[in-house]
Amino acid sequence: MLTRQTYLDIVNAHIKNKNLVKHCLAVEAAMRALARHFQEDEDVWGLAGLIHDADWEETANDITLHTKKTIEWLKEHGEDDTRIIETVLAHNYKNNGHEEPKDTMQWALYTCDELTGLIIATTLVRPDKQLTSVTVESVLKKFPAKAFAAGVDREQIKLCEEKLGIPIHDFVNIILTEMQGIHTDLGL
């Protein structure tokens, strides 16, 4: 398995938009928290979260390629951890032809990816724009408002209950708490 620094170097080499880099950091934190929840390997889960959107800027015009370029880059660097590779590919299964998520790690990335976006959007509409002042209740209050953060797929987030066995309130709490722990890195 490659080091976190190598993963971060790949992310920074291919993502110019700093907000997208911050999104990758947020998903890394979320995946680490979920790994702890399931008593799994935080490093492996975190790396999958960190790298999951590394090719987004280069594949945005052809969503069928999203994740495939990232896997090419990882393999060029010598990564052969199939847990990470399969998890990254599965998070875009609806577009890239990969099979749908099949294990807890893959469903964790699939569900938390969208939730980090909703949490950040909730933060940005607060008067102080501080992640530390966001509550689970404030995120859940925005959840049903389809016009708010319209690009966030709520159905994807809600799969946390069916696929991970985590009630939505608890899921938001796990992810929000971990993101608050890296609020400085996220600039929020």
Image (spheres, rainbow, N blue to C red):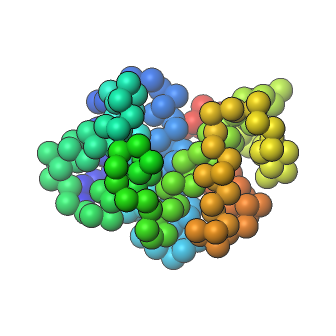
Q: Is residue 121 left or right of residue 6?
A: right
In this picture, is 186 found above or below 106? above
* Residue 179 in view, yes or no: no
Question: Residue 13: x percent and y percent?
Answer: 29, 30
Q: What residue is shown at x 35% (from left), y 38% (from top)?
A: 64
Q: What residue is shown at x 14% (from left), y 45% (from top)?
A: 76
Rendered-image quadrant of the C terminus: top right
Q: Is residue 19 left or right of residue 115?
A: left
Question: Residue 110: x percent and y percent?
Answer: 51, 54
Say which of 153 and 4 sits in front. Answer: 153
In this picture, is 25 found above or below 17? below
Q: Is residue 2 left or right of residue 43?
A: left
State the image quarter where residue 120 is shown.
top right
Rendered-image quadrant of the N terminus: bottom left
Q: How many marks?
A: 0
Say which of 10 and 187 sits in front. Answer: 10
Question: Residue 87: x percent and y percent?
Answer: 38, 58
Q: What residue is shown at x 67% (from left), y 67% (from top)?
A: 161
Q: What residue is shown at x 69% (from left), y 42% (from top)?
A: 119
Question: Residue 45: x percent and y percent?
Answer: 43, 61
* Residue 45 in view, yes or no: yes
